[in-house]
Amino acid sequence: MNRREAIVGVACGALGLSSLAAVKGAENGGKDSIEILTKVRSASKFSNKPVPEEDLKKIIAAGVNAPSGHNVQPWFFAAVTNRELLDEIDKLAGLNPGRLTLTGSPAAVFVCTDGSSFADFDAGGACGRMGAAAVLLGYGTKTIASPCKVVNEKYKEKLGIPENFNARAAFLVGIEETPAFDGVSGATERAPFEEKVSFVK
Ligand SMILES: Cc1cc2nc3c(=O)[nH]c(=O)nc-3n(C[C@H](O)[C@H](O)[C@H](O)COP(=O)(O)O)c2cc1C
């Protein structure tokens, strides 16, 4: 069992799940995986271990293959693992040092859109898929919008972002030091289900 598997195992254990096999159960529509995907929260601290490019590509592929309005695929994904560059952008953006931002993340995927009608909605859906893929691979994630202004003003060319696209969010991926799988401790509370959902039967 590698470290990532161990982390998922710990997370599963915290949820009363048996092992990584429970996460893998998602491939079979396993109910334990649904519980994990419902309860997982934003990462608050990553280890400095790199995310292998192969895993990062799998995560981004989940976004690239997401559905979009009229299938226009109004997105572009700029992945950055260069430590100096992530720190430089973070510094310029003046991000809150107390929070997990680019500096604490081994990898960031800048999710960019072209400004078309459904673009942000589509890109949000793509981020959701990437989040699910990352969790199933044993990673933690956090989405932050705060570095986007600096990226759009100064780094588009360096990041290979096409001229007509703008970064809307940075999707952070890493191995969590303390997996935020419990949905309670250290995580933001959610409104009750009934307050946010209506059912007409
Ligand atoms: C579109 C979007 C933008 C966000 N931007 C930031 C950000 O700039 N900085 C930050 O610390 N968190 C950011 N967040 C994280 C949210 O604050 C966080 O998901 C929310 O408070 C719920 O917390 P939890 O996921 O830890 O439970 C963002 C989340 C989303 C979905």
Image: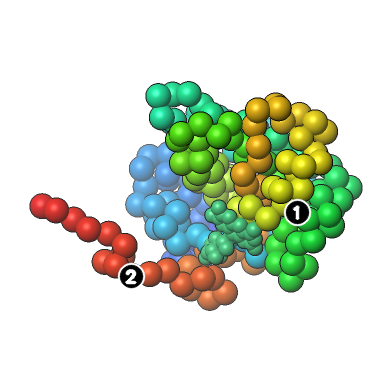
Q: Residue at x 66, y 41 (%)?
A: 167
The x, y position of residue 92, in whole percent, is 83, 54
Image: 162 above or below 173: above
Q: Residue at x 22, y 58 (%)?
A: 198
Using a 10 Å C-alpha cutoff, classify the residue at mark 2 as few (fewer than 14 neighbours), some (14 to 19) or many (20 or more). few
Compared across the picture, whether 126 is left or right of 105 comes to left
Q: Amino acid at mark 2?
A: Pro
SS type, badge 2: loop
The x, y position of residue 149, in whole percent, is 71, 48
Please give the residue where the numbered disc 2 appears in the rendered image. 192
Q: Nearer the viewer, residue 137 or 111?
A: 111
The x, y position of residue 187, in whole percent, is 54, 70
From mark 1 to mark 2, how far is it between C-alphas?
31 Å
Q: Residue at x 74, y 67 (%)?
A: 96
- The answer to whether residue 83 of the structure is visible from this angle is no
SS type, badge 1: helix
Q: Nearer the viewer, residue 169 or 115?
A: 115
As drawn, the label of residue 102 is 1
